[in-house]
Image: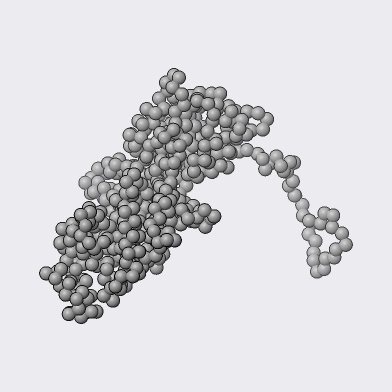
Amino acid sequence: MFQSAQDFTITGGNFTAITNIYIPPDASSTLDQIPPLPSLQSSSSFFTGRDTYLQALKDCFSLKLDSGRKSLLLYGMGGIGKTQICLEFIKRYGKKFSDIFWIDASSVHSIDLCLRQIAQKHELGSTPSAASALEWFSDRNDWLMVFDNADGGYEVVEKFVPAGNGGNILITSRDKALARITSGIHLEVTEMGEKEAIVLLLKSAMIDDNSVNVAIAAQKLVAVLGCIPLAIDQAGGYVQSCGCGLDYYLELFIKHRAKLMSDKKFRGASLYNYSTYGTWEISIEEIKRRAEGENSCAAQSALILHNIFAFLHHDNISGEIFENAAMNFMERKNEITNGLPQSISFLDPQTLFLDEDGNWDAPQFLAGIKVLLSFSLIRNNFEMLYFVHPLIQTWSRDRILVANASDCCQKSRSLLACSLNLSYQEDNYRFCTLLAPHIKTNDEHAAQWISDAQYYDDQNERFALVFDRVADWSQTEKWLSNMLNQRETKLGPLHPSTLTSMGNLA
């Protein structure tokens, strides 16, 4: 502190002698020291099922002479069991390979460290480096390298793939784009089947009871957990640790879902570092970080879509809804109304993906979709139809502040209303069939999240038309009756709009 100091004065201070100071012999060597390569983790003791994926891996990596390198990407949402499938594959078939190397591919730094650890273990040069490890791999065959949790983009992993045609590469990621590294060979990991999900739950909860009551409770619980392995394992860990029954946990889950799904203390037998909600929170926080950066438009679009999707039906969310809403919004901007509130007032160009000229900005919409797909927060079927796992939707709503949730729910509602043209076109029936489940689901959420529901005349009119077109008469009557009551009260019984409503309801 005082080295080379001179001509200074200290007033009102005391000096205390300090002893037993430890100075490392070479600080720089301590900073550069590489920790030893950790042992390969075992798969969960409760691993259950997933035979289709294990067989696919076995078929892909079956060793054949002169067949060249084999590569495969396992992709899917967080908590779906990708890592556990790889570990179980190694446990069952690992003897096929001369060496197995597990790489933490979560970042450039973690990959570099793992490769340097490999170089150190095998004494590859005086200074262990990633380059020396990769060179060593390129001269060998029959090894298996697993790049686990490669969620940072294909460019993070690509530069660390060993040269040559030997060995085998297995990648786990939330991002399907990593298939660029595996020559397009990929396999999506989806939810467990109900039967194997129940077996996993009972194993994790350590319940050895074949009674009908337990079977029914287990069936209900895996259903609300969406057959997601991490959620099931976490629930089983809670039941086992607390000594409660499945029925009681189900009651707790309904009342305290967000707290239970975020609790890291009950993370299950897989020893995964994050809770079910926590693993998805990582994804949304990364999207938020990107939204605040220089190239932020795609991430901002993803956040808008994420919030809107949370209040729709989980299946068949069509890009056509957004496109139609955008075009109708511009056509209706200056329309003459009957003076009652219109839900179109809740929409804005950003929510509708309108460009500066007021046109539907399809590239910007798809940029947001691409971000959500890259984190496996949604799935698609290449026809601009998207699917969100119901538990991810539940997490999305749970994490939004109540005031914001009300706004997001109403925006989704207004978007659905604005997407429909009142004219009876030939294509209307198909589109109404697409819209109906989303309107029903959104209406259920509105009852919970929109405490003081504002009446919007255009919304009621269009929703009534949808259900009329799909022949759902009870829903049609519900929306028409509400519209008639509001118009009679606010416009009077003889107003043309009121009389039209009477005619429609007759």
The quadrant of the rendering that contains the N terminus is bottom right
Whether residue 77 is visible: yes
Q: Nearer the viewer, residue 402 or 485?
A: 485
Question: Residue 51: percent from the left, percent from the top?
Answer: 33, 34
- Compared to residue 169, the image places residue 177 above or below, namely below
The spot of residue 461 in percent (x, y) is 23, 67
Tell which of 72 and 6 is nearer to you: 72
- 355 on left or right of 466: right
Q: State the residue at coordinates (75%, 49%).
A: 21
Farthest residue to the front: give it.
Answer: 357
- Work out whether residue 123 or residue 419 is closer to the camera in this orientation and state it: 419
Tell me, yes or no, if residue 241 can be seen here: no
Horizontal arrangement in the rendering, residue 24 relative to residue 197 (left or right): right
At horizontal 30% and vertical 65% (from top left) the residue drawn is: 446
Percent position (x, y) of residue 263? 43, 54
Q: Is residue 286 left or right of residue 323?
A: right
Q: Is residue 255 left or right of residue 11?
A: left
Instruction: Please say if 343 is above or below 493.
Output: above
Which residue corresponds to the image point at 54% horizontal and 35% vertical from the top-left?
160
Residue at 81% across, 57% down: 2
Query: Where does residue 499 sit, x and y in percent of width and height?
Result: 16, 75
